Amino acid sequence: MIFVSRFRCSVCNFIYEEEKEGKNFTDLPNSWTCSVCGALKTAFLLEGFSKGDEGIEKNVTERISNKKLIRKK
Ligand SMILES: [Zn+2]
């Protein structure tokens, strides 16, 4: 399972995704602040995010589309 690190701003709940931003949160300078509310790096909390969760979302989407097909019949 691949884990992607996410950091959540404890002030405005902005999510910093390392994969999306292309830079490790720990590599950001200490002067870096939240792009939404301007909170300091220390206000951010580490959250784990697994790529396996996307599979669950796809299954839900498939179930919904199946229901739509039944309704059409
Ligand atoms: Zn923020």
Image: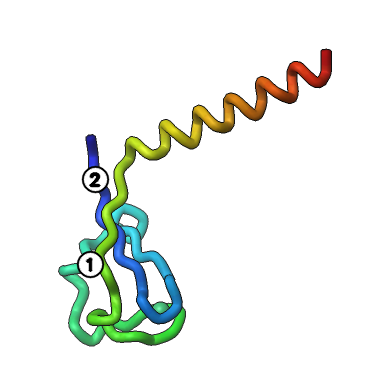
Query: What numbered label is drawn on residue 58?
Result: none
Describe residue 50's horizontal placement relative to residue 60 as left or right.
left
Q: Position of residue 41 (x, y in %)?
A: 25, 80
**Residue at the image point whose x is 27% and y is 70% from the top:** 45
Is 56 above or below relative to 26? above
Q: Earlier in the sequence, mark 2 or mark 1?
A: 2
Residue assigned mark 2: 3
Q: Position of residue 36 (x, y in %)?
A: 45, 79
Q: Position of residue 34 (x, y in %)?
A: 37, 79
Query: Badge 2 local density, few (<14 within 10 Å), some, or many (20+)?
Result: few
Amino acid type, label 1: Phe
**Residue at the image point whose x is 83% and y is 13% from the top:** 73
Asked whether mark 2 and ligand 1 are closer than 8 Å, the reply comes as no
**Residue at the image point whose x is 35% and y is 85% from the top:** 39
Describe residue 51's horizontal placement relative to residue 30 as left or right.
right
Towards the viewer: 41 or 67: 67
**Residue at the image point whose x is 23% and y is 35% from the top:** 1
Q: Position of residue 70 (x, y in %)?
A: 75, 17
Residue assigned mark 1: 25
Is 42 above or below relative to 72? below
What separation in Å lies between label 2 and label 1 (alpha carbons)? Answer: 14 Å
Q: Quadrant of ligand 1?
A: bottom left
Local SS, label 2: strand
The image quarter containing residue 24 is bottom left
Q: Residue furthest top?
A: 73
